[in-house]
Amino acid sequence: MAGTVYEKLADALSIRGGAVPAVKCKEFFALLEELFTPKEAELATKMPVSPFPAVTFAKEVIGGDPDEVRRLLEIMADRGTVFTIDRDGTRFYTLMPLVPGIFEMQFMGGEVSNRTKKLAKLFDDYFVLIGQATVRQPAASEGGTVVPFARVIPVEADIPTDVTIHPYDKVSEYIAKSDYIAIGTCYCRHHGELIGNPCSKPKDVCMAFGPQAKYVAERGFARLVSREEAIEVLNRSEEAGLIHCSSNTGKYINFMCNCCDCHCGIIQSMKRGVIPMGAVSSFIVAVDEDACNGCGTCIDRCQMDALTLDGTMLVRDGRRCIGCGLCISACPTEALKVELRKDAPVPPRDQRELNAAMISSLPQNK
């Protein structure tokens, strides 16, 4: 495979960053061959990192026919490998990273077919390989310094009224100010189902916001919903014990996964202590020892194994608590509450700042 267009494509995906590296191996090349035709792969290797109009790309980069280049880019966008955004009547294109990006688009539509089953197996083969090669790094709750692409947002209703809530910690504010909100299938749980590892938790709870929502709805990966339905989806997710994980930006968010530790790569990475895909929230759970009756109901609710019983006394492990707040609603004696985390992480303002922070935080760039 050395020297082929797919090796060049691996290089192109590598500079896009993301949570999963582009490692040149037979598993990765097999995945790329299913995702990109040779013609598409050749085009992708020449794409600028910043979004570009098809006409500019055709004339200034590859010297091709603009209509043919646009046609091919639209096909790739329909397949979930190229992202599009419209600005002032002009459509811009950009090659998506593997994760988050291409992986999610293959399964967000909830399709069950021979192709999606094949893709699910190819992704799983590659993820297993990457997981075996990953060296443990300090998780975000342990003072890890690698900036992740996602972060946990707490259950807003469980934050005491006397505690200051930053706008970036309030899901309701993101919903209120988003022009577009879309709901699709949870790609992680659908991927698991396609490889024979289903999950009983709800799947129709994956959310996208703003331009990302517009894109996934236009391409048939999800459907646009009202703000009221978005709130209903959040409430249903919380009742099912799912953790809210959003893009690690403060001004706006692109997505919100409602996650479980049995399938979600974000939660699994935080739980295992590998290079984290997600940052903890601004909060941490505190235990009122006098009010706690030691029933242990909250322990089953916690996906991070942050709560244990010592006799009849509940013990919180601050290194494992990510501040999601899901345990609070399960407590019959109101012995749990969230409090502000010391030196709580402040998310980068926007995607540009996040990309810069992620790149500069990598060990090789220090």
Image (cartoon, helix red, strand yellow):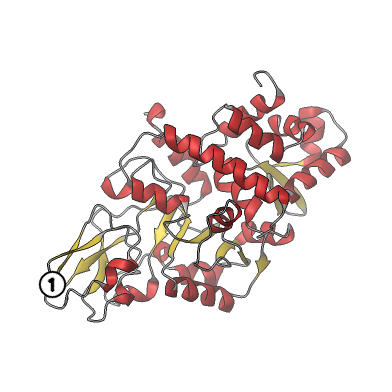
Give the camera-side residue of 333 and 26. Answer: 26
Q: Which three-letter amino acid code belongs to the residue tagged 1?
A: Glu
Residue 196 to residue 45: above or below: below
Name the residue: 27% across, 54% down. Answer: 320
- Mark 1 Cα-neighbour bin, 10 Å: few <14, some 14–19, many ≥20: few
Name the residue: 47% across, 76% down. Answer: 235
Q: Is residue 354 left or right of residue 68?
A: left
Give the farthest residue toward the top: 3
Name the residue: 33% across, 47% down. Answer: 140
Give the camera-side residue of 37 and 158. Answer: 37
| Figure quadrant of residue 12 | top right
Mark 1, residue position: 289
Name the residue: 44% across, 40% down. Answer: 358
Quadrant (top left, top right, bottom left, bottom right) of the C terminus = top left
| Figure quadrant of residue 26 | top right
Q: Is residue 270 left or right of residue 291?
A: right
Quadrant (top left, top right, bottom left, bottom right) of the N terminus = top right
Give the farthest residue toward the bottom: 333
Disc 1 element: loop
Which x, y percent locates residue 349?
46, 52
Which x, y percent locates residue 104?
60, 51
Which x, y percent locates residue 177?
55, 69
State whether residue 163 appears in this view: no
The number of callouts visible is 1
Q: Is residue 17 left or right of residue 143?
A: right
Residue 45 to residue 262: above or below: above
Which x, y percent locates residue 116?
68, 50
Residue 217 to residue 122: above or below: below
Give the camera-side residue of 36 and 311. Answer: 311
State whether residue 220 appears in this view: yes
Q: Is residue 279 left or right of residue 65?
A: left
